[in-house]
Amino acid sequence: QVQLVESGGGLVQPGGSLRLSCRASGSIFSINAMGWYRQVPGKQRELVAATTSGGSTNYADSVKGRFTISRDNAKNTVYLQMDSLKPEDTAVYYCNAVLRVLGTYHAHDYWGQGTQVTVSS
């Protein structure tokens, strides 16, 4: 009923930039928050950045000043602009949305399929 489709991952050199996009579609009544998480093998998934419907944002300390999250509410789309990328940013990046499906009363977490970001020379 609900799909989160990500795009924009790939291979980039250290110091380079990438822009991730994630669009939520389906029987959506409302979206409370959207964000990006990342995961490397053997480690827990961690929050990278998130934004609420009101426009507030939250960033991991490791990406502050380098990554920017933005959202187009009309398109149910969230973006992550990643600048000054470092090798330690290499991970699978997952889109997350806390949303309410039409005909229901509570919001739940939904996840995208993940997109690989590799920072290497």
Image: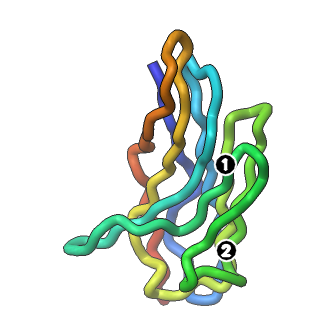
Cα–Cα gap, marks 2 and 1 = 13 Å
Please indicate whether residue 93 sits to the left or right of residue 7 in the image: left
Residue receiving disc 2: 67
Q: Nearer the viewer, residue 31 or 120?
A: 31
Q: Would you say 11 lies left or right of 46 here?
A: right
Q: First in sequence: mark 2 or mark 1?
A: 2
- Under tag 2, what secondary structure? strand
Residue 68's mark?
A: none
Q: Residues within 10 Å of mark 1 (few under 14, many from 20)?
A: many
* Residue that carries the numbered disc 1 in the rendered image: 78
Local secondary structure at mark 1:
strand
At label 2, which amino acid type do we have?
A: Phe
Asked which quadrant contains residue 26, the reply is: top right
Q: Residue 37's spot in the image, x, y percent?
A: 46, 61
Name the residue rendered at 20%, 74% in the picture: 42
20 or 97, which is in the foreground? 97
Q: State the residue at coordinates (29%, 69%).
A: 44
